[in-house]
Amino acid sequence: MLILTKRDIQECFSMKDAILAAKEASQLYSSGKAVVPLRTNLDVKHFQGQSLYMPAVTEGNQNALGVKIVSVYPNNIEKGLPSVPATMVALDPETGIVSAILDGTYLTQLRTAAIQGAATEELANPDAKIGGLIGTGGQGYQQAIAMMTARQLEILNVFDIDFERAKAFADKLGRDMKGVFGTAIVAVKTAEEAVQDADVVTTVTTSKVNTFQADWIKEGAHVNGIGAYTPEMLELPMDLLVKANAVVFDTNDGVLAEAGDIQAPIKTGLLTESDYTGELGQLLLGHIKGRESGKDITVFKSVGSAVLDIVTAQLIVEKAKEKGIGTAFQF
């Protein structure tokens, strides 16, 4: 069994690798070759916490099996501990034996960004040069890297409700990515500045109100809604979803059941479920159409799925074994 830390994963698995993994997972899911049960949520009342278990299995081109364990313990912050720790357990699908334990927090950041990168590759205009990122929390860093990996951006405008945090984020990202990408990372003071000229927009917050206005989005732009994953969260404006030429989900079942911004126009009668385009996996398989012209506005919405975790984890384990990375542990 391998133990794979964040650093181990970074050494053997790039964002490009993760985007390919996300595409593979999406196609398996949309082909009916993945079983993803509803996550089990245990309420640990005595310690004001929750423990969530997200299992999945795939078959076909990529056999994968595993379960991600995520805990939500808000009081951990007072103890100097992560409030949402996560661990990924990967199993050998042939034998059912645990093959690896991975840093689930970093894996989640990586696969969540990679599915956005996959959608950006498939839906954004090929000549996209300006990016806009809203939200610089725990997911923001990898989201920015995925945007720059998917398109050769000249500028990435970054907005956060805390401008000092946006500046610190832009400075760190610029330093870390110097020589990797030729993108200028710029902190801006308003969401409008971030998105008004952007060819690719990614919003990754837990906001209960829209993070931008639909009329700020220019013709031909592609928008990723990554943060809202509960019925109360409303990152994307309804007007954008109504006028978009294509609205694609990571999984239909997950997004329609969980994403408040996608549910809102259905509840108000502006759209029906059938008005949405379909899944990214269906697009990759050629079953639905995405962008059909340079002037189209396209939207991608993700709430995440355990299929992304297990496929990405399986490919990481394979790469780590090839390169001799990780700590082997024998019971």
Image (cartoon, grey):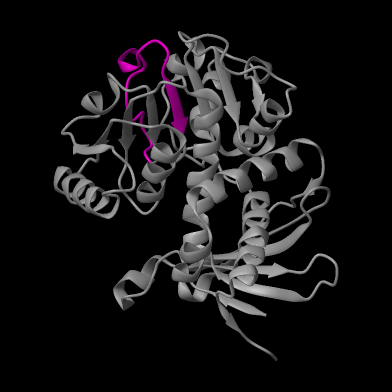
> Tag count in the figure?
0
Task: Identify the image quadrant of the N terminus.
Answer: bottom right
Query: Magenta segment, which residues?
Result: 206-225
Most prominent secondary structure in the magenta stretch? loop
Q: Position of residue 302 (x, y in %)?
A: 54, 37
Which of the 4 image quarters holds residue 221?
top left
Is 166 located above or below residue 138 in the figure? above
Visible in this render: residue 90? Answer: yes
Magenta residue check for 222 = yes
- Identify which residue, 96 or 125, lies in the foreground: 125
Task: Identify the image quadrant of the C terminus.
Answer: bottom right
Magenta residue check for 257 = no
Which of the 4 image quarters holds residue 328?
bottom right
Q: Position of residue 19 (x, y in %)?
A: 56, 44
In screen coordinates, is 114 left or right of 158?
right
In screen coordinates, is 233 left or right of 102?
left
Is 139 located above or below residue 13 in the figure? above
Outermost residue toward the bottom? 331
Q: Position of residue 218 (x, y in %)?
A: 35, 13
In screen coordinates, is 164 left or right of 201?
left
Identify the residue shown where x is 71% and y is 74%: 99
Identify the residue shown where x is 48% and y is 29%: 261
- Identify which residue, 63 or 300, lies in the foreground: 63
- Identify which residue, 281 or 127, lies in the foreground: 127
Identify the residue shown where x is 65% and y is 58%: 315
Q: Position of residue 136 (x, y in %)?
A: 30, 46
Visible in this render: residue 231? Answer: no
In screen coordinates, is 178 left or right of 239?
left
Is 249 located above or below residue 88 in the figure? above
Identify the residue shown where x is 39% and y is 26%: 200
